[in-house]
Amino acid sequence: MAKTDVFITYIACMGVLIRDDEKSILIDAIITPGIRPYPSITKEVLVNMIKKAPPFNKIDYILITHEHEEHFNPDFVCQVLSACPEARLIAPKTVIARIRGSRYFKKRFIMQMIGLDIAPNKMVDFTLGKFQMFFIHLPHEADMHDIQNIAFLIQLGHYRLLFTGDSATNIEVFQQAGLTQKSIDCIIAPFTFVITESGVHTMDILQPRYLIAIHFPLPQYDVNKRYQNALDIINNPLSPLPRNTFLLTESMKTVIIR
C-alpha cells in the first residue's frame, strides 16, 4: 500500500492541525486570544473552524494536553464541538471540568468527550478501528507537578507522530514512559527541545526524521532571542537535530511528512 502524506499545519502558540486522507486532528489549537507573550489564534482561523471551512472541513479529534490558557479556551472549544458533533475530544479530566463549566456547554458534549487521568510517565493505548493513539503523562516543564501534561503518540498510516505538549526536556522522562522504544517519524515539541542541551540530547536519542518546534514567543517579547538561537543551532553543521527540523511561527504554515 502506497504511503499517504501527512500534513501538519501550525495554528498558534502550541496549536496544530494534523491530517491525512482519513483523519483530521486538532491539538492545543482552540486557545484564548491575546495570550502574551505567545502568538494567539486569529478571529479568521477560529471562524473557519466553526464554519468548517478548509482545512477544518472535517475534524475527527480535538486533543488537549493540559489546562493552561495558551493550550485551550473552554468557551471556544464548546463552540467548535457544537459545530462538529462528529468530533471526539480527549483531554485531562481537569480540562474536561473547565469545559463543562463554560456557559456554552451542552449536555450532548458528554458523549463526545473522554477524560484522562494517567499516572506520571505512564502510557495508555487507545485504539478505535484501525486508528491508534497512545496517551502519555509526561511531566510539565519547570517542575509544575500539579499539571497533568498529556503527550499524544499518533499513528497515521505508515507514520508515527509524537506531540509532547509542554513536556520537560530531559531524556529520562521519555525513557521511563517507554518512548525510546518506539520508532517515531515526527516530533512536535516546544522550542526548548531545540535550544537546551537536554532537549537536543533527547532529540538525538529519539532520532525522529522530522522535528517541528513551536510555542515561540512573539518577536516583540523574544528578549532572549530564542528564535534566533534555535535558528543558529539547526543551521550549525554539527547539529545532531534532524535535517528536517522546522521552526514554525507563521499561522497556517504547513509541513508535509512523506
Image (cartoon, helix red, strand yellow):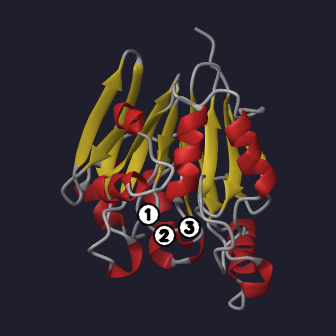
Quarter holding the N terminus is top right
Residue 112: image quadrant is: top left
Q: Which mark is on residue 70?
A: 3
Kindly identify the amino acid type of the residue bearing the numbered disc 3: Glu
Question: For the residues carrying marks 1 and 3, which lies nearer the camera in this image?
Answer: 3
| Residue 181 appearing in the image | no
Q: Tell me how far mark 2 sits from mark 1, CA to CA.
A: 5 Å
Left or right: 229 in relation to 28? right
Category of crowding for the residue at label 2, using alpha-carbon neighbours closer than 10 angstroms: few (below 14), some (14–19), many (at least 20): many
Residue 216: image location, x then y, percent: 66, 71
**Label 1–label 3 contact, CB within 8 A:** no
Question: For the residues carrying marks 2 and 3, which lies nearer the camera in this image?
Answer: 3
| Residue 179 appearing in the image | yes
Q: Which mark is on residue 199?
A: 2
Query: Please, is residue 230 above or below residue 129 in the view?
Result: below
The mark that comes first in sequence, 1 or 3, is 3
Q: Which mark is on residue 43?
A: none
Residue 155: image location, x then y, percent: 46, 30
Left or right: 104 in relation to 142? right
Residue 213: image location, x then y, percent: 63, 61
In-front residue for pair 112/221: 112
Q: Tell me how far mark 2 sits from mark 3, CA to CA.
A: 21 Å
The residue depicted at 61 percent of the width and 54 percent of the height is: 15
**Label 2–label 1 contact, CB within 8 A:** yes
What kind of element bears circle 3?
Answer: loop
Residue 110: image quadrant is: top left
Residue 94: image location, x then y, percent: 31, 59
Left or right: 25 in relation to 118? right
Left or right: 12 in relation to 172? right
The residue that disc 1 covers is 202
The residue depicted at 60 percent of the width and 65 percent of the height is: 32
